[in-house]
Amino acid sequence: MISDGMADVLRSLRLDGGGDPARACARALGADGVALSLLVGSGRTAEPLWHYPDVSARFEELQFTVGEGPGPDAVSAGAPVLEPDLDRVRSDRWPALLGPAQEMGVHGVCCFPLGIGAIRVGVLTVLCAADRRMSEQPSADAQALAAALTGAILNGDRRGSRSGSGDGPGLDAFLERPSGLNRAAVHQATGIISVQLGAPMEEALLRLRAHAYSSERPLGEVAEDVVARRLRFDDDVSGPYSPDGGKG
């Protein structure tokens, strides 16, 4: 049974799709943050759609950079991964993620996969509040939200509100991708590195992630340097380097 707060959120999304859905969902869940990502492309890359507040976006970027965390695990298993207290997580479970996550003030994370059966379409990430608990009610609310988002994504229905009025954009109207959050540069950089190294795309993405992690920079920034020819990966002896003038 979902709470009245989550019922109001889902109702408002169905009616007009307006406002800030991430903020509304975070408040209804009593969470420190919420983020929604879709899986796109043959590599099933997590493409962020919306988040609240900024720490949620930074945590999603961290997971994508290191290639590990509750989000990837939830997608792989097709089941929620609930870790409301990162202090209790074994250090060898997500060795590259735990330290940086705690440094950015993330106390706990609960991730809910979006999908039906073997079909995976995305993941809902909930940052647990500082008291490090996620009770039965918020968990039920988050799963209801994940189910509603799954239905909106799979149905792709933009014919209007499901409330019967038919005069609103419907639940999936707020799934439009914000222009500032896509990973186009990462996809482009992966292709460029693949050519530079003569290596498969999977290896190219691993090399890109490794460099971002070792240099303690956001993956998107490193990718933009590759696309702008300010960074090359074709020197296996010295590793990635910046050509003179950034022209490659």
Image (cartoon, rainbow, N blue to C red):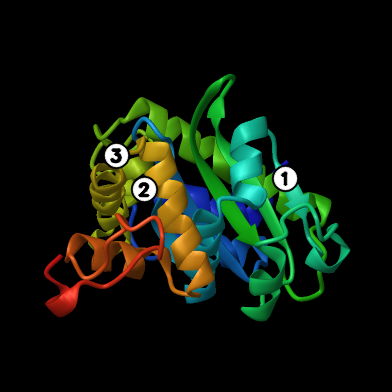
Find residue 110 and report its horizontal and vertical position in percent: 69, 53
Relative to 82, say whether 227 is above or below.
below
Q: Are marks 3 and 2 in contact (CB under 8 Å)?
A: no
> Of the residues under marks 3 and 1, which one precedes in the sequence?
1
User: Which residue lies at the image location 28% right of the left edge and 59% below the top edge?
Assistant: 178
Indicate the position of residue 113 as horizontal and vertical percent values. 59, 39
Dot 2 falls on a residue whose secondary structure is helix
**What distance separates the C-alpha of mark 3 from that of mark 1?**
37 Å
**Residue for badge 1:** 81
Side (left or right) of 115 relative to 157: right
Q: Quadrant of residue 44?
A: top left
Q: Is residue 243 above or below residue 146?
A: below
Q: Determine the secondary structure under disc 3.
A: loop
Q: Is residue 115 above or below residue 168?
A: above
Within 10 Å of the Cα at label 1, are there few (<14), some (14-19), or many (20+) other Cα atoms? many
2 relative to 212, above or below: above
Residue type (three-letter) at the residue carrying disc 2: Leu
Foreground of the two, 76 or 112: 76
Dot 3, how many residues are within 10 Å of its Cα: few (below 14), some (14-19), or many (20+)?
A: few
Residue 162, image x, y percentages: 38, 34
* Nearer the observer, 57 or 147: 57
Q: Is residue 213 left or right of residue 44?
A: right
In this rendering, which labeled residue sits more in front, label 3 or label 2?
3
- Three-letter amino acid code at disc 1? Val
Numbered circle sitting on residue 15: 2
Question: Of residues 93 and 80, which is closer to you in this image?
Answer: 93
- Where does label 3 land, which residue? 198
Which quadrant of the structure image shows residue 241? bottom left
Marker disc for residue 19:
none
Q: How far, Cα to Cα, is label 3 from label 2?
A: 50 Å
Which of the two labelled residues, at mark 3 and mark 2, occupies the earlier sequence position?
Answer: 2
